[in-house]
Image (spheres, rainbow, N blue to C red):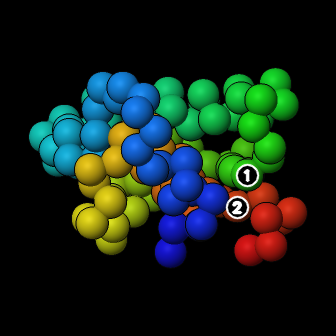
Amino acid sequence: MIAPFMLMLMADAGIATFTDGHELAAMCRADRPACTRYVVAASDMVASLENAKALPPSVCIGADADAKQLTDTVVRFLANHADALDQSAGALIWAALYDAHPCPSNGQ
């Protein structure tokens, strides 16, 4: 399930995006190392924004998680939410990580 606030963030806000979920899913099927780099970069960005307090804490990935696990989480999320693939890849990665690794304060 995609958290309600994530749906709001994923809604078309008239902001240009460069990669959507369809492109990310295709990348993950064709070039897993490139997919992993994209997922890790996006998860690093989420962590950076949360650490800078630009975003409230929402994703709490344990120190034992590795790049393969994060990529597998995102790939599984994309497969299970095919109806959302028109959204930006970044928003979908955030939603996947939030779904799998919510912070305790998120009530999950």
Residue 88: quadrant of the picture: top left
At 81% from the left edge and 24% from the top edge, which residue is drawn? 52
In the rendered image, residue 43, in percent from the top left (x then y), is placed at 56, 37
Looking at this view, is 34 or 92 the one in front?
92
The residue that disc 1 covers is 58
| Residue 98 image label | none
Looking at this view, is 71 or 106 the one in front?
106
In the rendered image, residue 71, in percent from the top left (x then y), is placed at 41, 47
The residue that disc 2 covers is 102
Looking at this view, is 52 or 37 the one in front?
52
Q: Are marks 1 and 2 in contact (CB under 8 Å)?
A: yes
Vertical relation: 89 (above or below) 10: above
Residue 34: quadrant of the picture: top left
Instruction: Give amino acid for label 2.
Output: Pro
At 29% from the left edge and 32% from the top edge, which residue is drawn? 19
23 left or right of 72? left
21 left or right of 2? left
Q: In which quarter of the image is the C terminus?
A: bottom right
Instruction: Give amino acid for label 1.
Output: Ser
Q: How many marks?
A: 2
In the rendered image, residue 81, in percent from the top left (x then y), is placed at 33, 67
Q: How crowded is mark 1: few (under 14 residues within 10 Å), some or many (20 or more)?
A: many
Vertical relation: 66 (above or below) 2: above
Q: How crowded is mark 2: few (under 14 residues within 10 Å), some or many (20 or more)?
A: some
Q: Distance between the residues labelled 1 and 2?
A: 6 Å
At 79% from the left edge and 46% from the top edge, which residue is drawn? 57
In the rendered image, residue 5, in percent from the top left (x then y), is placed at 63, 59
| SS at circle 1 | loop
